[in-house]
Image (cartoon, grey):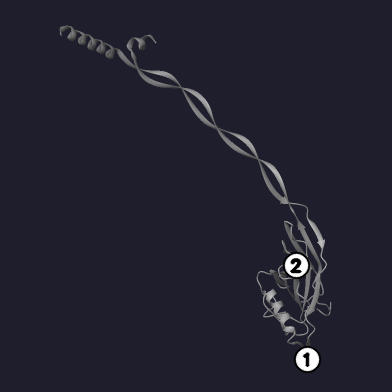
Amino acid sequence: MKKLSLFLSVIIAICLVFSVSCVIKEVPVTETYYETEYRTEYRTETYTEAGKEHRDVLTPKKVWCSSIYFKEWKWGESSPSYLSQFPTSTVRSCYTGFEISAVGHSKSQIRLTLISTGTGPWIMGIYDLTKVGQIPSPPTHGETVQRGGVWYFILTPEYQPWFDNLNSVVSDPKNILYFTDSDQYTSQEIIVNVTGVEELGIITTSVPNFAADPTYAIVEKYQLIWFDEVTKERQVPYQVPYQIEKQRTVTQTKKVPFWEAIFR
């Protein structure tokens, strides 16, 4: 028992000696860390751009004129409304129909070059007739009568089915591509998108200036403009992150024997 007590006393004494003899010291330590940096890489990207522009002069497939006009229409207040069959003799509508090769092209336009002189007030409606077909010429059944010095066109029963069909086409919003009149449009050209159109119809109502030109024509040339998109490739830069291993020296505190603190 005495030996055990002596042994424990020695151990405790040794621990006390080492505890008292240790001091706190700052020492340099090398540590590893990582930083994120970026490098430029490239990937292939496809894009489209307009190809070469093509132009074709259009020849009408169907042309007819009739003594009808756009109902409830006033100069400067045009709207795609019904046609009326009771105009005065100085107002006339002419239809020009085209079969165009706009299908299959990326973009197609029709360009109308207007006659610069000789035309009086006019109104124009342009229609997509792809699902309808060209509007046939009006029947000849009908007569004109003069009332109070003014000539009127009187429809016969045979005329009405044709006229009803015409009105159903021009009043359907799905068919209307463009609508304007001489008060709203002052340029000499009208350009309308006709991409995907196969059959096209244009109806113009005009009051000609008979002193300069006794005709009802207001368009000098019809032209189809089209182009196809071209697919190309280009290299597009982008940033890729990656880790870089680095080292640095930092200061840490730790306990060391006092003699080590003295001799180092």
Give the class, few, some or many, for how many residues have Cα within 10 Å of label 1's Cα (few <14, many ≥20).
few
Specify whether residue 22 is in view. Answer: yes
Against 250, is 137 above or below?
below
Residue position for label 1: 146
What SS does tag 1 mark? strand
| Residue type, mark 2 in image | Glu
On the image, which quarter does residue 160 sit in? bottom right
**Outermost residue, bottom side:** 148
Residue 234 in the image: x percent, y percent? 69, 42
Residue at figure coordinates x 80%, y 64% from the top left: 223
Residue at figure coordinates x 75%, y 68% from the top left: 200
Task: Name the front one of labels 2 and 1.
Answer: 2
On the image, which quarter does residue 55 sit in? bottom right
What SS does tag 2 mark? strand
| Residue type, mark 1 in image | Gln
Residue 216 in the image: x percent, y percent? 80, 77
On the image, which quarter does residue 209 sit in? bottom right
Residue at figure coordinates x 78%, y 70% from the top left: 97
Location of the N terminus by quadrant is: top left
Against 124, is 21 above or below?
above
* Res. 82 mark: none
Location of the C terminus by quadrant is: top left
Residue at figure coordinates x 81%, y 70% from the top left: 61
Residue 93 in the image: x percent, y percent? 76, 78
* Res. 199 mark: 2
Instruction: Give the mark, 2 or 1, whose residue is nearer the N terminus.
Output: 1
Against 76, is 248 above or below?
above
